[in-house]
Amino acid sequence: MRSLLKKFTEGLKRTTPTFSAALGKVGGLFSRSLDAASIEQLEEALYGADLGVETAGEILAEIKAAWKKDPALRGQDAAKIGAAVLKGALAGAEKPPVLSYKPGQPEVICLVGVNGSGKTTTAAKLAAYYQKQGRGVVLGACDTFRAAANEQLKSWATRLNVEIISSQTGADSAAVAFDAWQAAAKRGKDLVVLDTAGRLHTKHNLMEELKKIRRVLQKHDPAAPRHRWLVLDGSLGVNSIEQARVFHQAFDLTGLIITKLDGTSKGGALVGIHRELKLPIHFVGLGEQPEDLQPFTVEDFADALFGVEE
């Protein structure tokens, strides 16, 4: 099994069994012919994974058409059909971020999203990811509203041996972003990763705060922050789409990171988000460790979701 596919399969352990059960992978119909009952089970599984009505309908239609042509269609063949349709629905979703490293001009990744989405942990994991690529990283603790977020990011920075710029609770988050960029530029670092606040219940204030961060950074670089990534909790299913709409409208997002896919049966929601907003999915979170933040690949995600191993 491909190593990254294995990681997806392990991470999606609560999603994949939904399809495995419907297809009878373990000791059942996965290797035998489908019947009306298993088709019905599959339909329930598709909608249960929050793939969205459009995508679930397309997958089901293709499987039913194949079954009509070949009544001996096996569950594993149906899984391959489902994975193929899903790959088509996610066309364009796989787009690795292109970072421009220039001396004295560090690139900025600004993470946004609601509280609880995994922003702070993701900021730290991104720092670890780019460190492994030989890049110098500075973390900016711009969620100055929550003391716990600052402490969490500081703890990660110590663990990863990454420099962090922070301030006291209630400080101006834009000033922290400004200081983080300056520190990175002076020290010859390549990248600044900013963790921001996520108080969506005070939406107007939050969005104004994000816009201010952007304005302040543009004093250094007119295009900063070039990377504006929304961190979404994958366990929220279709409810996360509205969050994506709000942040995209206010902050002109350039990409997505979907977290917590290791503990949800609703991992298919990222399909609907991509189809509506046409944003690339850069990374997915498949566990608690730094190495569990993985670059998103359409092929591995689709194959893991349907239990296709070859």
Image: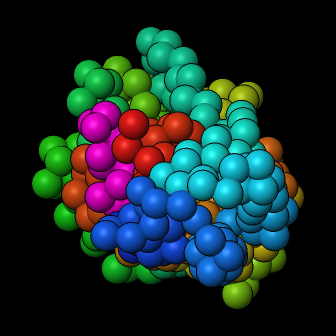
Quarter occupied by residue 242: bottom right
At horizontal 55% and vertical 29% (from top left) the residue drawn is 96
Name above or below for residue 256 compared with residue 154: above
Q: Which residues are magenta?
A: 1-12
Dominant secondary structure of the residues highlighted in magenta in the image:
helix
Quarter occupied by residue 128: top left
> Percent from the top left, x then y, of residue 137?
34, 35
**Magenta includes 7?**
yes
> Percent from the top left, x then y, of residue 91?
72, 36
> Percent from the top left, x then y, of residue 73?
60, 53
Of 233 and 209, which appears nearest the observer? Answer: 233
**Magenta includes 191?**
no
How many badges with numbers are in the image?
0
Q: Residue furthest bottom?
A: 201
Residue 295 visible to the viewer: yes
At horizontal 26% and vertical 22% (from top left) the residue drawn is 134
Q: What sort of colour scheme is used for the picture?
A: rainbow
> Percent from the top left, x then y, of residue 31?
42, 56
Quarter occupied by residue 5: top left
Residue 186 visible to the viewer: no
Using residue 122 as the reference point, say whether residue 278 is left or right of it: right
Of 242 and 143, which appears nearest the observer? Answer: 242
At horizontal 34% and vertical 21% (from top left) the residue drawn is 188
Of 304 and 214, which appears nearest the observer? Answer: 304
Name above or below for residue 182 compared with residue 228: above
**Quarter holding the N terminus?**
top left
Name above or below for residue 169 compared with residue 6: below
**Quarter holding the C terminus?**
top left
Using residue 285 as the reference point, say whether residue 152 is left or right of it: left
Q: Residue furthest top?
A: 103
At horizontal 69% and vertical 50% (from top left) the residue drawn is 70
